[in-house]
Amino acid sequence: MKIIKSTDIPGLIKDGDMVVMPGITNCYAEEAMIRIAESYEKTGHPAHLTLFWQAAIGILGGDRGISSLCQDGLFDIAISGHISGCGVPMTEFCRDNRAEFYNFPQGVTIQLLRAAADGGPGVITKIGLGTYMDPRVDCAQMNSISKKRLVELLEIDGEEYLLYKTPKKKYDVVLIRGTYIDEEGNISIENEAYKNGYLMAAAAAKATGGIVIAQVEKVIQSGSRNPKDIEIPGILVDYAFEADPYYHMQTGDTQFDPAFAGQVRVPLASIPPMPMNFKKVICRRAAMEINKGDIVNLGVGTPEFVSNVAGEEGCPDLFTLTSESGAIGGLSGKAHDFGASRNASAMIENEDMMVIYNGGTLDEGILGFLQVDENGNVNSSSRNGLGIGIGGFMNVAAGATHPLFIAQMVAGTRGNAPVYEFGNGQLKIVREGNVKKFIKKVDQISFNGKIGLEQNKDIMFITERAVFKLTEEGMTLIEIAPGLDLQKDVLDQMEFEPIISPDLKLMPAEIFNEEWGGLAEYVHSKG
């Protein structure tokens, strides 16, 4: 293992190489990205790269890190688990056809690293059948210049599967990160908020003839760490550099929080409560679907705040909140702290968590949505024609027995968002939004309702003004918020007519009040 400067990295990358960047939020080798971008801007090299990343990495809306690579000719192909989470420049780069973009489920991208390390052809799975991953639909292609067929349909013992592949068999350069690296190249990750598949990424490089470059906080003397604390052995590492702390943030929002690293535990009272708004109502109602002892995943966006509700209600220990990043237990971070967890009971590998999800261990998967149609198909990956990517959504939705899709029922363009009044156990729509989410046909299928029903899933859609259940007969309205007019506030805000349950109920009035305090009792009452 050789210690280098970050400015040496571009010289280790050849034109046309595949560069692999494991990570989530800002927990990735950001300084390496900056040096590659600077080199290309000055010299035109390295160029025509294939980029591979498994999750949303970068500061959303910023132009640093991976977004700095959005220069014409720097990369020709991108394969990722998420696009918009890498920043607006990356989303627009995809939209404008400035490179080919392919989007795989996060659980697939991370498993592709193991497949490469093991010498396999790719990842064979049922995840993505009937969605835009399926070659009979869009074949994971995210813009009009993306023509490669990187997903194949297989039949094994009479059952359908998808085979996901990368366009190159060689993982030329893998960029990983950690906390400390010793003189023999052994890396520990005690200050990291996540485990990001670094070991398998490094093994994939070695198995295919590539190199591994590590970004770390500090080089230390050999033998300074317990061998059991080593995450990546030195036999897999070729180069390492000490990073500028500015480019070595723990998450997208946090430079360093010892609670995210599992080094301390924080009192629940230190976590600020949510303001009273539509998200709080939705998350309260979603939390009421969780049974005592359940294993739950919280998706990005509104679902993140179920963690806040659980904390406020004093019952996070009644069920186990998890994240696709590998966090088990505790309270999940929000926004650009997504995937990190305070007071977690365990932190396992991203890949291992995805395997657990894929196997059906999840009880509830609480996920956001952009659009829903009458067949229960969900779009969570394309917004206004922009490919934003899927992240872990497909793995969670496929693995959960009881998927809960939650979001505001009607949204709004700037200046046209709905305005609400809450209180006295009721909801009032003061001003209606102008973007309907329950529509005739979704722009992109991220979850296939028909396949979900065939798998005997209990599928629900929870909004601030109504609750729906997907049945064999169709989308069924089962609850409406107290204080609303069924026709004006619900049915007129949908492009299709749902089945109205003969046992239509009111949503619990108490969740529309500023104070609640009833979740723990409700969960206990369900046994």
Image (cartoon, helix red, strand yellow):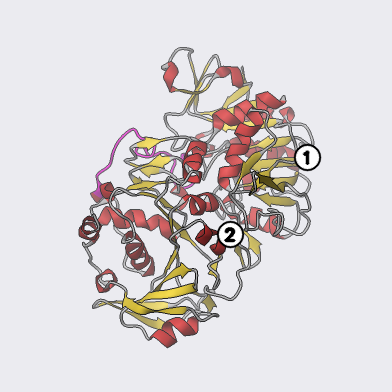
Q: Position of residue 181 (x, y in %)?
A: 51, 21
Tag 2: residue type? Ser
Categorize mark 1 by other alpha carbons within 10 Å: few (<14), some (14-19), many (20+).
Answer: many
Q: CA distance from mark 1 to mark 2?
A: 33 Å
Nearest to the observer: residue 356 or residue 196:
356
Look at the image and give the residue range highlighted in magenta: 249-268
Identified at 28% across, 51% down, the residue is 292
* Quarter of image, res 440: bottom right
Nearest to the observer: residue 262 or residue 134:
134
Can residue 236 be seen here? The reply is yes
Q: How many marks?
A: 2
- Magenta residues: mostly which secondary structure? loop
Categorize mark 2 by other alpha carbons within 10 Å: few (<14), some (14-19), many (20+).
Answer: many
Q: Position of residue 272 (x, y in %)?
A: 29, 55
Can residue 272 be seen here? The reply is no
Within the magenta stretch, is there residue 443?
no
Identified at 41% across, 78% down, the residue is 419
Left or right: 320 in relation to 16: left
Decide: is 276 above or below 349.
Answer: below
What is the number of the mark on residue 375?
A: none
Within the magenta stretch, is there residue 251?
yes
What is the number of the mark on residue 47?
A: 1
Decide: is 347 above or below 482.
Answer: above
Q: Position of residue 88 (x, y in %)?
A: 61, 56
* Residue matched to label 2: 446
Q: Position of residue 427 (x, y in %)?
A: 33, 78
Q: Identify the element where label 1 is drawn.
A: loop
- Which is nearer the N-term, disc 1 or disc 2? 1
- In what quadrant of the picture does the C terminus appear? bottom left
Nearest to the observer: residue 158 or residue 99:
158
Tag 1: residue type? Ala
